Image (cartoon, rainbow, N blue to C red):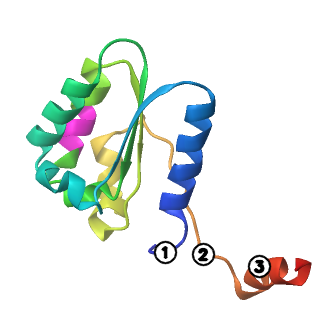
Amino acid sequence: MRRCGKSSLLELFKEYLKKQNAKFIHISFESLEFEHLSDYKELYKHIKSKIKSGKYYLLFDEIQVVKDWQKAIESFRLDFECDIYITGSNSHLLSGEFSTYLTGRFVEIKLLPLSFAEFLIPRAWQ
């Protein structure tokens, strides 16, 4: 679902990792800075060049723009000591096919937008 807080949740996790002094790589594919990473091989080369040693957290926001992204994700899992977090709102990414790419290796967090009543609660505190 679009506009329900996936990117915000990923940002909160990134801030948590910073406080823990954890090594992480965060890529938001909505940024033109990463436009050149639209192919899984380019993404893999980019991440490989950034990883030195030890455990890394890989955070990918809106990964569905990367062609064959699942191939890169599977390679990261096999080649590096890492935890991988991805978001996306494309129907292909969220379809039943997604589970076949990483069967038994992922935890899905479903986010929904606030209801109207939930939206009004913070306003009552002001």
Which residue type carries mark 3? Glu
Instruction: Tell me which label, 1 or 3, sits earlier in the chain.
Output: 1
Which residue type carries mark 2? Pro
Residue at point 42% right, 35% down?
Answer: 104
Which residue type carries mark 1? Arg
Instruction: Tell me which label, 2 or 3, sits earlier in the chain.
Output: 2
Residue at point 76% right, 79% down?
Answer: 118
| Horizontal arrangement in the rendering, residue 16 relative to residue 1 (left or right) | right
Q: CA distance from mark 2 to mark 1?
A: 7 Å
Residue at point 58% right, 42% down?
Answer: 15
Q: How many marks?
A: 3
Residue designated by label 3: 118
Q: Quadrant of the C terminus?
A: bottom right
Residue 4 in percent (x, y) is at 54, 71
Asked which quadrant contains residue 85, the reply is top left
Q: Are marks 2 and 3 in contact (CB under 8 Å)?
A: no
Considering the whole magenta stretch, tell me its main secondary structure. Answer: helix
Residues in magenta, as a range: 70-74
Q: CA distance from mark 1 to mark 3?
A: 15 Å
Q: Nearer the viewer, residue 105 or 65?
A: 65
Secondary element type, mark 2:
loop
| Horizontal arrangement in the rendering, residue 115 relative to residue 17 (left or right) | right
Q: Nearer the viewer, residue 33 or 10?
A: 33
Residue at point 29% right, 22% down?
Answer: 51
Residue designated by label 1: 3
Dot 2 surroundings within 10 Å: few (below 14), some, or many (20 or more)? few
Dot 1 surroundings within 10 Å: few (below 14), some, or many (20 or more)? few
Residue designated by label 2: 113
Q: CA distance from mark 2 to mark 3?
A: 9 Å
Q: Is residue 97 magenta?
A: no
Residue 7 versus residue 20 in the image, above or below: below
Dot 3 surroundings within 10 Å: few (below 14), some, or many (20 or more)? few
